[in-house]
């Protein structure tokens, strides 16, 4: 039987999947399988509740129900673990992988490892808010970001550390879903990062297939230290490579670096333009790519390849073979999409 699922103005056609057995007390969600999952982005906030003092010395949003919106401005009360934004920020996915960005001072990007090629984000964080930390039929949150920028997040490198987004005038986010691409846009106004105050626009785009997200950052002022990177684990070495023509490069890690178990494997990579690179170095929590000062903007790609992905990459050799093919494509065409 065919079903139609409408989400934020998008109509998805697919087949209803078999529901997993669950405890009697748990509600079984309907899962809509999509033959080729369209790229999808969403942001979901609570309505109908109230801001109240919480046990973590900050306000928490109590009560209410989640509602998907196309755009929102982060309220002053919001911080990490405020329970106001479902899974704490915007999310985006395609048939291979899902990502989310913590829309608070951390500003890190996390990975949702997917074991299905269907739409999953609408179900994430609906049962117990952070149920995505446990393995489900679709997969789970697999990255421990800690104090890092996660994978492909951004901040400013100053005095051997990354300045995140502790001090921002306003943060506004919007999502858009079009044929062939889904986007998340974030506008930061009055970001105070050490000795500078700047506005920053971030555009994150995901496409129908493959694991990469394209990131375009545009600051309003020219400053040093604008950075991205990959969370650093001491037991996992970072590898780097430059394309044949020297136009693009990447940093990448592969190994046991997930929250799943001690043998679970994950590959992560960031591709960057060599003429935008200031330096590539090791931070306290991240393998860093530091960009040259500019107001013209910078463009980079990041990707995550989880071994449990449906028909995915399951070993290090194949992971780096895939990265090298992408590096060659970037060298020749300047784009992955």
Image (cartoon, grey):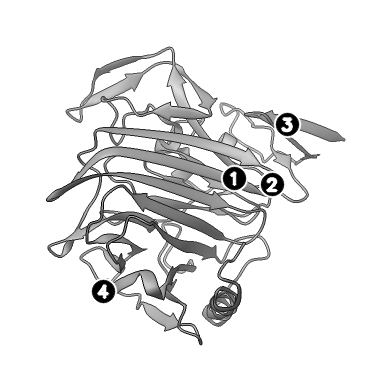
Mark-to-mark CA distance, 2 and 3:
12 Å
Q: In this picture, is 109 found above or below 283? A: above
Q: Residue furthest right?
A: 1
96 relative position to 109: left or right: right
Task: Evaluate if marks 2 and 1 touch, with contact meaning CB atoms under 8 Å apart.
Answer: yes
The spot of residue 120 in percent (x, y) is 61, 42
Tag 1 residue: 182
The spot of residue 93 in percent (x, y) is 58, 48
Give the crowd class for mark 4: few <14, some 14-19, many >=20 residues within 10 Å.
few
Mark-to-mark CA distance, 3 and 4:
45 Å
Tag 3 residue: 5
Q: Which mark identifies residue 275?
A: none
Tag 2 residue: 38
Tag 4 residue: 281
First of labels 1, 3 by sequence position: 3
Mark-to-mark CA distance, 2 and 1:
9 Å
Give the crowd class for mark 1: few <14, some 14-19, many >=20 residues within 10 Å.
many
Q: Secondary structure at mark 3?
A: strand
Q: Secondary structure at mark 2?
A: loop
- Name which residue lies at 78% across and 31% down: 4
């Amino acid at each position: 039987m065919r079903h139609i699922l409408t989400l934020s103005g998008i109509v998805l056609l697919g087949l209803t999947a078999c529901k997993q057995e669950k405890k009697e007390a748990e509600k079984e969600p309907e899962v809509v399988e999509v033959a080729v999952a369209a790229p999808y982005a969403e942001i979901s906030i609570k309505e109908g509740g109230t801001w109240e003092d919480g046990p973590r010395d900050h306000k928490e949003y109590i009560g209410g129900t989640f509602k998907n919106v196309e755009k929102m401005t982060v309220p002053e009360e919001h911080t990490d673990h405020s329970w106001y934004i479902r899974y704490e920020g915007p999310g985006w996915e395609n048939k291979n992988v899902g990502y989310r960005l913590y829309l608070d001072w951390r500003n890190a990007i996390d990975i949702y490892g997917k074991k299905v090629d269907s739409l999953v984000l609408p179900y994430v964080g609906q049962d117990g808010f952070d149920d995505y930390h446990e393995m489900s039929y679709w997969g789970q949150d697999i990255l421990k970001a800690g104090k890092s920028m996660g994978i492909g997040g951004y901040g400013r490198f100053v005095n051997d550390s990354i300045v995140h987004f502790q001090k921002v005038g306003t943060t506004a986010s919007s999502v858009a879903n079009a044929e062939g691409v889904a986007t998340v846009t974030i506008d930061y106004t009055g970001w105070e990062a050490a000795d500078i105050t700047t506005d920053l626009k971030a555009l994150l785009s995901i496409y129908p297939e493959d694991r990469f997200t394209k990131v375009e950052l545009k600051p309003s002022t020219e400053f040093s230290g604008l950075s991205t990177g990959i969370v650093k684990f001491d037991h996992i070495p970072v590898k780097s490579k430059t394309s044949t023509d020297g136009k693009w490069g990447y940093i990448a890690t592969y190994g046991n670096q997930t929250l799943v178990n001690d043998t679970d494997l994950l590959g992560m990579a960031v591709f960057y333009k060599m003429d935008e690179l200031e330096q590539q170095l090791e931070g306290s929590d991240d393998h860093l790519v530091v960009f040259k000062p500019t107001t013209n903007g910078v463009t980079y790609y990041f990707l995550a390849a989880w071994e449990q992905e449906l028909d995915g990459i399951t070993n290090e050799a194949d992971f780096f073979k895939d990265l090298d093919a992408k590096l060659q494509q970037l060298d020749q065409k300047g784009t992955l999409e």
